[in-house]
Amino acid sequence: MQQLGEAKLSLMATRIRERKAPTLSMAPMIDCVFLLLIFFMVSTTFAPMPGIRVQLPPPGEPSKEKPKGLVVKIDNPTVSDKDGTMLLNGQVVQFDEMFAILLNATDEQKTMLIIQSQRDVLHEQIVRVMDVAKDAGIDKIGFAITARD
């Protein structure tokens, strides 16, 4: 009898030694993560970004008539200057002068500002001109290009 008891103990001891550590299955967790990802992708709404509404002219021949309102022409920057030369109705101006001129312009001239820039002008300069125009009370801004030679 005692041998039978010792055999049971040795059998249990070997079973305890042979017991493997428990493992976690990652598949259910990955399924849950993918379901959450799909849920958030479907339920998310994207708000449209506010921007500038631009109305482009129809394709065809360029207009020969001179634009009405104020015209800012921005020439390509030189090697020594990062900003291009700005001409407001034919007069060379800087940003601080431009604000005063646009602010003192007549109501008829303030109806629209047309920005005419060459190819290598930085976007930063064009945006700064648009900001100055908006601060001066000009709501409509147009863009013009010169025909290639």
Image: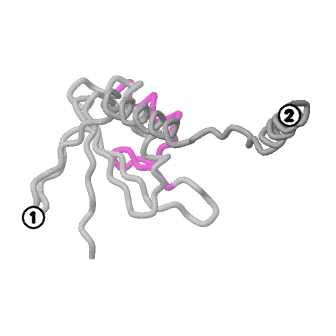
Numbered disc in front, either 1 or 2: 2
Label total for image: 2
| Residue 24 position within the rendered picture, expressed as x and y whole percent measured from the top left | 62, 38
Which residue position holds label 1? Answer: 61
Which residue position holds label 2? Answer: 9
Residue at (37% x, 36% y) in the render: 38
Q: Disc 1 on helix, strand or loop?
A: loop
The N terminus is located in which quarter?
A: top right
Please tell me how crowded label 1 is: few (under 14), some (14-19), or many (20+) other residues with Cα within 10 Å.
Answer: few
Give the vertical position of 148 relative to 53 (above or below): below
| Residue 149 position within the rendered picture, expressed as x and y whole percent measured from the top left | 27, 76
Q: Which stretch did the figure color magenta? A: 84-104
Query: In this image, 25 relative to 59: left or right?
Result: right
Residue furthest to the front in view is: 1
Query: In this image, 68 relative to 37: left or right?
Result: left
Q: Quadrant of residue 45?
A: top left
Please tell me how crowded label 2 is: few (under 14), some (14-19), or many (20+) other residues with Cα within 10 Å.
Answer: few
In the image, 77 versus 21, the foreground residue is 21
Residue at (12% x, 53% y) in the render: 65
Query: In this image, 66 relative to 122: left or right?
Result: left
In the image, 91 versus 37, the foreground residue is 37
Residue at (33% x, 47% y) in the render: 115
Give the vertical position of 77 relative to 52 (above or below): below
| Residue 67 position within the rendered picture, expressed as x and y whole percent measured from the top left | 18, 47
User: What amino acid is labelled 1 in the image?
Assistant: Glu
Q: Is residue 85 magenta?
A: yes
In the image, 142 versus 3, the foreground residue is 3
